[in-house]
């Protein structure tokens, strides 16, 4: 900006300092700020900074807001004054936070970490954000600020920051969709988002990013199957498993992977009804073939259901583990039974898919944590 020989007048400065009302001081502040923004002679600069400090410390919010609004886009606003205004009330701070070019990326990150949601949104609405500010929003920003920043391709989010956003807002469709529609996405983020977003956004991920349709489909099916296992868990023995399995089969969701996951959790009744649905064999006969027909019964109904040959050893191991634990009498506590079931199943040679094993290991960790928590809550009994 070209500098002019504009001078600060004593009258305006006296009005600013000694004005009888805040309206008078605010008018003087606005006038002085316009002169400062237009450029000052070198000899007036120090006096100008002192005047700005007076304005920033004025007891009247109206005066401080006049300063903030008038110099919000000025490169002549001293950084120290800008930071002081950023710590002020929202009406004073927001114009400066949103527009001022004097903040560094680290300044903006500090504002995000220490400020209200309104100020975080003001940071997010800036035209561009560096990695420090974007990373601070990813980790500390409110939902609205993160959604706004993710919608801006000039906000430089690192892969780690995008992972943090997915960790914090997995169920917020607005945030996950904003991430999904960014022009550039790391492959790991694209694949993670497939299980979090709507069908429309999922199609966008497959079409616009480095994500194969096969990968997308596999991830989505995995998420749906895990949710179904949880549903089976909740349904318990009283559920209408015959109708449930028929419904899943009608939607082509009664998959080998789902059956294996459910069986490894000890849901043998679900496996029986699923095999009955897939094979067309009545449930009472399936029960005999699974539980009481020797080593060939399970294989016979398994093949009748047209399940993959390569996975039969995994099902065999799961069913054998279930029967062994029945003999040991550990069916009293469901969660502890499932923990033992998973431990034994996962330590036997079997041919489950890697993603199935990973999921079962994760569930084993969750069950173990639940057991430890329950144990800590039990009252200590006197000897």
Image (spheres, rainbow, N blue to C red):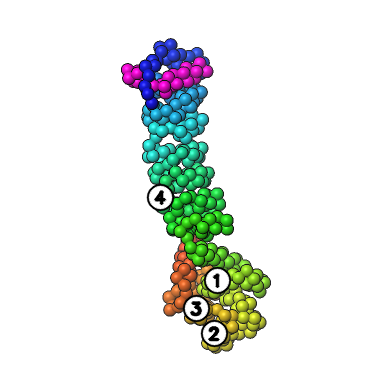
| Residue located at (44% from left, 58% from top) | 187
Closer to viewer: mark 1 or mark 4: 4
Q: Mark 1 or mark 4: name the one nearer the start of the chain.
A: 4
Q: Which residue lies under the disc numbered 4? A: 158
Q: Spatial distance from mark 1 to mark 4, Cα to Cα?
A: 35 Å
Q: Residue furthest left?
A: 43
Horizontal and vertical percent position of residue 309 = 51, 81
Q: Secondary structure at mark 1?
A: helix
Q: Which mark is residue 311?
A: 3
Q: Mark 2 or mark 3: name the one nearer the start of the chain.
A: 2
- Is there a contact, CB below 8 Å, between mark 3 and mark 1? no
Which corner quadrant of the image does residue 286 belong to? bottom right
Q: Is residue 279 visible?
A: yes
Q: Is residue 64 visible?
A: no
Q: What range of the chain is rendered magenta?
A: 23-46
Q: Which residue lies under the disc numbered 1? A: 258
| Residue located at (57% from left, 56% from top) | 200
- Is there a contact, CB below 8 Å, between mark 1 and mark 4? no
| Residue located at (50% from left, 78% from top) | 311
Disc 2 crowd, CA 10 A, few/some/many (<14, 14-19, 20+): some
Residue situated in front as seen by the camera: 202 or 52: 202
Q: Spatial distance from mark 2 to mark 3, Cα to Cα?
A: 11 Å
Q: Spatial distance from mark 3 to mark 1, Cα to Cα?
A: 12 Å
Q: Secondary structure at mark 3?
A: helix
Q: Secondary structure at mark 4?
A: loop
Q: Is residue 129 left or right of residue 290?
A: left
Q: Which residue lies under the disc numbered 2? A: 299
Q: Spatial distance from mark 1 to mark 2, Cα to Cα?
A: 18 Å
Q: Mark 3 or mark 1: name the one nearer the start of the chain.
A: 1
Disc 3 crowd, CA 10 A, few/some/many (<14, 14-19, 20+): some
Closer to viewer: mark 4 or mark 2: 4
Q: Mark 4 or mark 2: name the one nearer the start of the chain.
A: 4
């Amino acid at each position: 900006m070209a500098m002019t020989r504009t001078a600060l007048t004593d009258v305006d400065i006296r009005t600013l300092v000694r004005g009888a009302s805040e309206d008078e001081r605010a008018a003087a502040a606005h006038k002085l700020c316009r002169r400062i923004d237009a450029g000052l002679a070198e000899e007036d600069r120090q006096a100008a900074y002192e005047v700005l400090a007076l304005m920033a410390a004025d007891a009247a919010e109206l005066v401080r807001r006049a300063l903030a609004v008038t110099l919000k886009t000025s490169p002549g606003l001293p950084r120290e004054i800008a930071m002081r205004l950023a710590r002020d009330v929202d009406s004073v701070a927001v114009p400066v936070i949103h527009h001022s070019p004097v903040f560094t990326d680290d300044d903006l990150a500090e504002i995000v970490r220490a400020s209200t949601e309104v100020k975080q949104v003001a940071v997010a609405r800036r035209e561009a954000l560096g990695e420090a500010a974007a990373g601070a929003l990813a980790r500390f920003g409110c939902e609205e600020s993160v959604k706004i920043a993710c919608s801006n391709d000039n906000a430089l989010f690192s892969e780690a920051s995008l992972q943090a956003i997915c960790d914090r807002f997995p169920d917020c469709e607005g945030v996950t969709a904003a991430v999904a529609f960014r022009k550039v996405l790391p492959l790991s983020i694209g694949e993670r988002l497939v299980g979090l977003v709507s069908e429309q956004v999922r199609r966008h991920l497959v079409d616009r990013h480095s994500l194969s349709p096969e990968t997308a489909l596999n991830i989505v099916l995995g998420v749906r199957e895990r949710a179904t296992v949880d549903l089976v868990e909740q349904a318990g023995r009283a559920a209408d498993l015959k109708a449930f399995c028929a419904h899943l089969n009608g939607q082509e969701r009664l998959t080998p992977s789902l059956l294996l996951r459910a069986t490894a959790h000890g849901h043998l009744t679900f496996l029986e009804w699923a095999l009955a649905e897939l094979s067309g064999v009545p449930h009472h006969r399936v029960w005999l073939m699974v539980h009481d027909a020797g080593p060939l019964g399970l294989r016979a109904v398994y093949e009748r259901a047209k399940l993959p040959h390569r996975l039969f050893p995994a099902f065999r191991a799961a069913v054998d583990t279930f029967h062994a634990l029945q003999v040991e009498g550990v069916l009293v506590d469901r969660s502890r039974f499932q923990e033992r079931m998973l431990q034994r199943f996962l330590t036997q040679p079997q041919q489950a898919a890697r993603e199935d094993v990973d999921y079962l290991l994760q569930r084993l960790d969750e069950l173990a944590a639940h057991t430890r928590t329950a144990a800590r809550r039990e009252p200590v009994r006197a000897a």
